[in-house]
Image: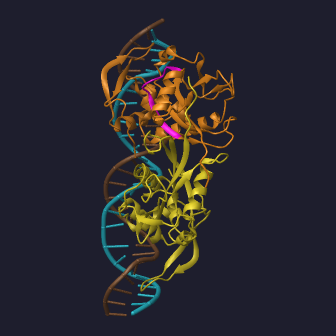
Chain colours: A yellow, B orange, C brown, D cyan
Amino acid sequence: MSKPASFHVATDIAVFTIRADVLNVLLIERASQPFKGNWALPGGFLNENEGLDQCAARELAEETGVRGVYLEQLGSFGDPGRDPRGGVVSVAYFALVPADEHALLASTDAASARWFAFDDLPKLAFDHDKILQVAHARLKAKLDYSTIAFCLLPAEFTLSNLQMVYEIIKGETPDKRNFRKWVLALDVLEETGDRRVEGAHRPAMLYREKTPGTIKIIR
Amino acid sequence: MSKPASFHVATDIAVFTIRADVLNVLLIERASQPFKGNWALPGGFLNENEGLDQCAARELAEETGVRGVYLEQLGSFGDPGRDPRGGVVSVAYFALVPADEHALLASTDAASARWFAFDDLPKLAFDHDKILQVAHARLKAKLDYSTIAFCLLPAEFTLSNLQMVYEIIKGETPDKRNFRKWVLALDVLEETGDRRVEGAHRPAMLYREKTPGTIKIIR
DNA sequence: ACAAAAGTGTTTCAAATACACCCATGT
DNA sequence: ACATGGGTGTATTTGAAACACTTTTGT
């Protein structure tokens, strides 16, 4: 048994949000080789004395200015050849950014971080298209058995806002009354007491999470 | 931005089976430092030009003689300090071994690989106790929404055998009639036509999977 | 008055649960 | 004959799904 091989360990983050009624993904333009000039998931190398979650959060903040969002480990990708330099294992994460906090992108390091519509993506570096597919599948599945959808909304939102999230991600339109019954039965929302006036129609009641930031697993 | 740190990447595998009506985990006694003499999950370092899944399968075969079993990536563990040598990231897997194939253990490299009852484990090396907890949680959860339970049984089994798997892992006793109704409604089993004679009572019908080794996701 | 989204209940159907006795075998 | 685990059906409850009209606002 010989001395074990050395690797660089990277984290790559699939960051989702909803913009203009469409699911969006945050990509950065690579500033150096390999894949210089290509679009890629934000991410970077793990430092000595740093945990994986910590690395993902740090890289996300450095490269895109996004902080304090929902971040969850997705899985690891280590096929030989996934990085032309060789010897790079990536621990993928996925992150959800509320639909309003796009100001975050102002404080960006990597000059060119941009949102892309999920179904109109450019060609991606490395195996990042594969990572994104896995992330998307996880997001879709998790809508059904958890309350992560709230992570895609601002602190206060209407039930229509919430239903829109489900429609956009799952691509189907649930019945309005059944949807509302279902959500309220989860017993995780409370009325703020305010309403949102927005256009030539009846104002909508605003809701917030009873315990913000708590992801509840359903079933 | 400095040159990225180098790591060793390991895979560690939580191998479950059922023995003597109890959930068991396969551990090996470490032959070298660190944690020499302690019990640990089987596993080892990723080689250059090797995929993660491949590494897990290889290490499992080398250290325990177990091959061709269900193997699934669990998640990665990279807290600084999880290995006293530092700089080791572990990609954890979990594996399910059918309740009969214990002969496999004959062909073992690491002289001392042993099954332990899951609720009577020795002190483990590294963060392997944490990995095992995650693996156990996954196993329990996955019983409910997939057909992995079959991976813990030989090719032919009785419905009582199958129910036992659920009882042992979930720690609760489903109603016999409802359980059988539920399983058969999944439409993944077929009768072999044979019966198993075993003791002073009515022989049980034997079943097999219609498409062996296919894990079906339920919901 | 009209357009546009918000809000609201009841009925129907399917799936999960609770529940108790007879059957085939070995000793 | 009896002890042991194998095998079976129905009634009840619960949760999911289908379905259409009234309300509040701005223009």
On whether residue B72 falls in the magenta region, the answer is: yes
On the image, the x and y values in percent for residue B21 come to: 54, 23
In the depicted view, which residue is nearer to us: B50 or A102? B50
The image quarter in which residue B27 lies: top right
| Left or right of B101 on screen, residue A175 | left
Q: Is residue A188 magenta?
A: no
The reply to whether residue A187 is in sight is no
- Residue A52 seen in the current view: yes
Query: Is A168 positioned to the left or the right of A66 in the image?
Result: left
- Vertical arrangement, residue A24 with respect to residue B17, above or below: below
Residue B9, above or below B30: below
Residue located 50% across and 64% down the image: A152
**Image position of B49 with respect to B31: above or below:** below
Give the magenta-colored segment's residue range: B64-74
Residue at left offset 44%, top offset 39%: A80
Q: As rendered, which of D23 and A29 lies closer to the eye?
A: A29
Q: Position of residue A28 (x, y in %)?
A: 48, 61
Q: Is residue A83 left or right of residue B5?
A: left
Q: Nearer the viewer, residue B214 or B68?
A: B68
* Residue toward you, B156 or A64: A64
Measuring from the top left, give residue B168's x and y in whole percent.
Answer: 54, 30
- Residue drawn 47% across and 82% down? A198
Q: Position of residue B148 (x, y in %)?
A: 44, 34
